[in-house]
Amino acid sequence: MQATVATFSPSTRSGTVLLDDGTRMTFDADAFDHSGLRMLRLGQRVVMRVVDGRVTAINHIALPLN
């Protein structure tokens, strides 16, 4: 699933994304830590894995989900 970063806090490593239909979803530090990235920027496109309505992994759109 793809989305756009709406908010990101480097201190908590969590934030929110907007799906293409406008739905806002949150992600926590565990999902971000799966990426190996050091930060996300607002407006950045990402790919994510969602299980039971929860973001479990998030990464830059050009990189694979682990």
Image: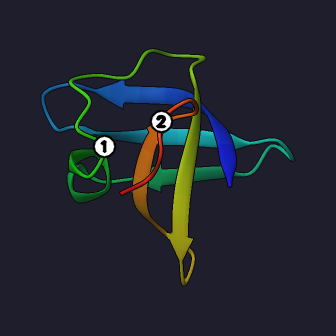
Judge depth for marks 2 and 1 and give the one in front.
Answer: 2
Residue toward you, 11 or 61: 61
Q: Residue at x 82, y 41 (%)?
A: 20
The residue tagged 2 is: 63
| Separation (CA) of disc 2 from disc 1 | 9 Å
Is 1 situated left or right of 49 in this image?
right
Residue toward you, 18 or 34: 34
Q: Residue at x 58, y 33 (%)?
A: 61
Q: Quadrant of residue 56?
A: bottom left
Q: How is the image coloured?
A: rainbow
The percent coordinates of residue 2 (x first, y second) are 68, 45
Is 19 situated left or right of 64 in this image?
right
Badge 1 amino acid = Ser
Badge 2 amino acid = Leu
Is 10 situated left or right of 54 in this image?
left
Q: Earlier in the sequence, mark 2 or mark 1?
A: 1
Q: Residue at x 44, y 53 (%)?
A: 65
Q: Residues within 10 Å of mark 2 (few under 14, many from 20)?
A: few
Say whether marks 2 and 1 touch (CB < 8 Å): yes
The residue tagged 1 is: 35
The disc placed on residue 13 is none
The percent coordinates of residue 55 (x first, y second) are 46, 63
Quadrant containing the N terminus is: bottom right
Q: Quadrant of residue 59?
A: top left
* Farthest residue, direction left: 11
Q: Is residue 53 above or below residue 46?
A: below
